[in-house]
Image (cartoon, rainbow, N blue to C red):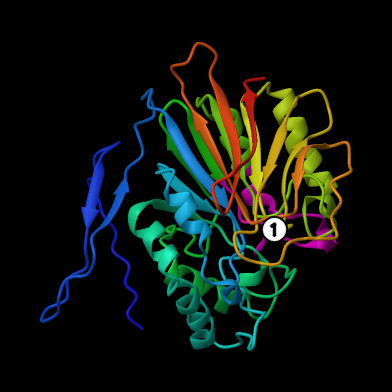
Amino acid sequence: DGTVRVQLRGLEPHTDYYYRAAVVGKKPGPIGHFTTAPSAGSDEVVKFCFSGDTRESYQPFAIMDAIRAHAPDFFIHLGDTIYADRGSWTAQRLPEFWAKYRNNRADPASQRLFASTGAYIIWDDHEVANDYEGFHPLAAIGRKAFFDYWPVRRNAGEPDRLYRSFRRGRALELFLLDARQYRDHAHGTLLGKEQKQWLLKGLSSSTALFKCVATSVPFWGGGRDRWDGYPRERGEIMQWVKQNKITGVFFISADVHYAAVTRLPGKLGLKEVVTGPMAAPMNVLATGTSKRFEFFSNKTFNFGMITIDPRSSRPHAAVEIFDENNASLYQSKIEIS
């Protein structure tokens, strides 16, 4: 239905590129823009925004313009990019999933953000069905539609693989997890064996100052459908970080429809930044009274922004959370521990 995927090769690091779509016999499309990542040894400042949850009935997605105003190097959508299983109709067949993506992509503010900013996208349950596990009968159709509508490069050896990592200069390595298609409650795994080993190896071998683990569902808190439902696997990851003395690890997530900064238990000093929704019902039942919360808000749509300057005398990740009007809700720092 008019979508197209073009892989660009031979791009230079930390360079602005502009593009437009051209079709013979038609007026060229609007000009788009993205900036490539700095090389691994570069001391460039890295600034990115992130959030999740965009439900079509909540358009216009005005928060997209608030994100764009910060001119981030890139944006991370942390899942529930559509609500295939919600609304006046639910998606069962591929054209119906496509229609859900078209409805969301028709939002003008979303078009402005994605035309001006590079994006990393992960999925969660509502791209398929609420709280689904990997063996859901609609998973393959939902996954194909996700690949059709988002710029995710297919892995040559594993074309259905969604977990991946990206290096952004000396400041950051980003680990994007797939918290859906490999999960199996019966065997106590959210990631599956291969993805878990990939993450552990990647964390211990990374030379970046900070290692950001992006997971669509919260690493701590939120109940059975989140990492709380897989405590053994979560414990393995935290133990690996401790045993290998891995520094600069932090987590970002969405899904629970409130903003929070969570102090993870233990002596590692690890933190998780939870954001969202951008355009979906707020979680009005959550109280935020738990001692794990350094910050909590369930009053307004929101997104996070993290800035890392590797050249500062004490490199840190500056954390900010904003509402849809770009009012600051929270500011703090994550130190290298």
The x, y position of residue 117, in whole percent, is: 37, 51
The x, y position of residue 264, in whole percent, is: 79, 34
Residue 144 vs residue 226, the one in the foreground: 226
Name the image quarter holding the N terminus: bottom left
The x, y position of residue 222, in whole percent, is: 81, 53
Describe the element under mark 1 as helix, strand or loop. loop
Residue 297 vs residue 38, the one in the foreground: 297
For badge 1, the amino acid type reads Asp
Q: Which residues are magenta?
A: 176-197
> Please, is residue 314 above or below residue 169 in the view?
above
Instruction: State left or right for residue 32 relative to residue 160.
Output: left
Instruction: State left or right for residue 322 relative to residue 74.
Output: right
Of all residues, the one furthest to the left in this rendering is: 25
Instruction: State left or right for residue 115 relative to residue 272.
Output: left
> Please, is residue 90 above or below residue 199 in the view?
below
Give the labeled residue for mark 1.
255
The x, y position of residue 174, in whole percent, is: 52, 40
- Label 1 packing within 10 angstroms: few (<14), some (14-19), many (20+): many
Name the image quarter holding the C terminus: top right
Q: Is residue 181 magenta?
A: yes
